[in-house]
Amino acid sequence: MKLTVDQARTLSRSYFDLAKTLGEYRFENFDTISPAKRKLIEEFERTLLNASTTFTAIAITISLTELEPVLARIDEVTKQIEANINQLQKIDRVIKIAGAAVQLSGAILSGNPEAILKAANDSVALFA
């Protein structure tokens, strides 16, 4: 029998509540229950808690399985974003280099030695 996430969660909560109630009963009636029966009730309580934990694990496993297609799509989108960021970084670099070339050409055309030196240094710094 294959459980849904909701069914596994419901079973987990039910077995947890049952173990809790059993534990409360054991403590409330501690003095009236024989040690052997207290031990048996405690073992049942532990078994019910283990069942609760198992159903929680099943719910988590089912949830993760259902997420696999979503996670695969997120991975695809992340890779596309990374590729686009790399492309944007290349475009940004191209724009900076082109801008530096325009500044250098303008400085050269101006004949201003200080402007030429500054534009040349700015251009070289892009490749350092």
Image (cartoon, rainbow, N blue to C red):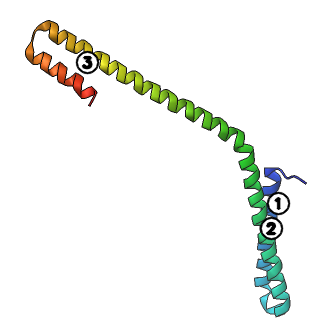
The residue lying furthest to the right in this view is 1
Tag 3 or tag 2, which sits nearer the N-term?
2
Quarter of the C terminus within the rendering: top left
Disc 2 to disc 1: CB gap under 8 Å? yes
- Name the residue: 37% across, 23% down: 92
Amino acid on which disc 2 is placed = Ala
Q: What is the x, y in percent for residue 14?
A: 81, 63
* Residue drawn where x is 83% and y is 78% of the image: 44
Look at the numbered disc 1 and give the secondary structure of its residue.
helix
**Residue 38 coordinates in the image, percent (x, y):** 81, 87
Query: Which residue carries the number 2 mark?
Result: 51
Location of mark 1 (residue): 11
Compared to residue 70, the image places residue 96 above or below, namely: above
Q: Nearer the viewer, mark 1 or mark 3?
A: 3
The image shows residue 23, relative to residue 102, as above or below, that is below
Give the distance between the C-alpha atoms of the residues marked 2 and 1, in whole angstroms: 9 Å
Amino acid under label 3? Ala
Precedes in sequence: disc 1 or disc 3: 1
Against 33, residue 75 (above or below) is: above
Residue annotated with mark 3: 100
